[in-house]
Image: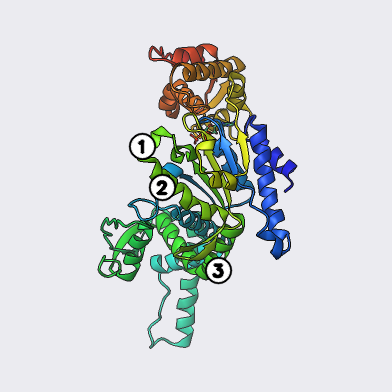
Amino acid sequence: MTPREIVAELDRYIIGQEKAKRACAIALRNRRRRQQVPPELIDEILPKNILMIGSTGVGKTEIARRLAKLAHSPFVKVEASKFTEVGYVGRDVESMIRDLVEIAINMVKEEQAVMVREKARERAVNRVLDLYHPPLRPAANLSDEDRDRILARHDAHRTNLRDKLIAGELDEEKVKLEVNDAQTPFMTVFNGSGTEEIGFNIKDMLPNLLGGGKTKEKDFPIKEALQRVQQEEEQKLIDMDSVTKVALERVENSGIVFLDEIDKIAAGGRQAGGPDVSRQGVQRDLLPIIEGCTVNTKYGMVKTDHILFIAAGAFHVAKVSDLLPELQGRLPIQVDLESLTEDDFFRILVEPKNSLIKQNTALMKTEDVTLEFTEEANREISRIAFAANETQENIGARRLHAVMEKVLEDLFFDASEMGGHTVVIDLTYVQEHYGDQSTSDMKKYIL
Ligand SMILES: Nc1ncnc2c1ncn2[C@@H]1O[C@H](COP(=O)(O)OP(=O)(O)OP(=O)(O)O)[C@@H](O)[C@H]1O
């Protein structure tokens, strides 16, 4: 996609923040451009990583996440303040690459699962049918004629059952499945790096010790049995070697890491606590990863050269210049995100493809309740959210979620008994349902 197309696509979800959207679109395109230049030049061209500066809830993560979705990129969001310098107890910075790989593995596995789903479903139907009505083994002393006749009848019956099974008519019938009887003990292994991987490996190595080898039979309704067996068959059909290969390639060539709260590891960023030296240590550890190095993961080595890093922070206390100059250099594209206005709130409420209004309307539809918001109601919700941010903590557009939840609380409670009705959320509805003195007389609003 060209930067223009990327921005147009981002516009469908994110209101305003034009500069940030442009910067991200350019960075994404430049990564591709850099991958295509002659190899001897690649090292000369610094990757164009981004630093987004803006308060909480103004769309920083949303832009990065949407960008990743557009590019089908593995995406991970990590908080820089959670890291500790190598050699100290806690998460080391390389773990973000391991997390990214894990995400990519799941992503590719899911894609492959979709491709083998039909085949897995067919196998699951056959297996569950065998359990429900096993194939017949006629007695050996029968004449050929009798055997053929019995088999034909049995087959016809099975075909009939098969159709019923597929049609869901046998969903409530029971079959026995073997299930793993493992009671995996809760175990945490602390060490400086990659805690999660060590826990995992021990489990792999010593399945019997952890009861992983034992199975027992259990009754399941056919509907659930089908799902379980299908999942099992999907796992069998998925080629893990190819999943790993594709996932590693995808991380290296199109991975995106969103490094939030980068300001908290800057010198002068008071919130993080701890001495400035340790925060500087984390910054130093970040340098090689952002610049391009090789990280060892349990799936293999990963080169970080082409991973796109988007760092973000509010920089209310610390300043960008408090970051190590080398780190600033690795984040050459710096963009300020604007604070959102009341009008932005209104647009965020209604315009995006996944806007809160659309989400809640869809939720209500599942109860056969039609929800209609009037423009005045949306204006009022935006006004309340904006005012709350002024008087309380400013949490950006997240405030809209909080206000909306409160406004719709009664409705969410009652909706299950209101099927077939239309509810109009107008100005008075919002005013009456927001705030502690909500006078929840729903009847007035039901059409
Ligand atoms: N400009 C915007 N357009 C549309 N939705 C937005 C915008 N800004 C924020 N939102 C919505 O608000 C919520 C929070 O936004 P987001 O996660 O991007 O915050 P952020 O700026 O990354 O803050 P933080 O650094 O605290 O994570 C999201 O659900 C998002 O949908």
Say which label, 2 or 3, has the lower sequence index. Answer: 2
The residue that disc 2 covers is 83
Residue at horizontal 59%, vertical 46%? 329
The residue that disc 3 covers is 242
For the question of whether residue 315 can be seen, the reply is yes
Which is in the foreground here, disc 2 or disc 3? 2
351 sits left or right of 82 in the view: right
What kind of element bears circle 3? helix
Q: Work out whether 338 lies above or below 117.
A: above
Question: Foreground residue, 253 or 83?
Answer: 83
Q: Work out whether 389 lies above or below 77.
A: above
Residue at horizontal 34%, vertical 52%? 88
368 sits left or right of 69 in the view: left
Image coordinates of residue 407 in percent, x first then y, are 46, 20
Amino acid residing under circle 1: Gly
What is the CA distance from the residue labelled 1 to the residue labelled 3?
Answer: 44 Å
Residue at horizontal 55%, vertical 26%? 370
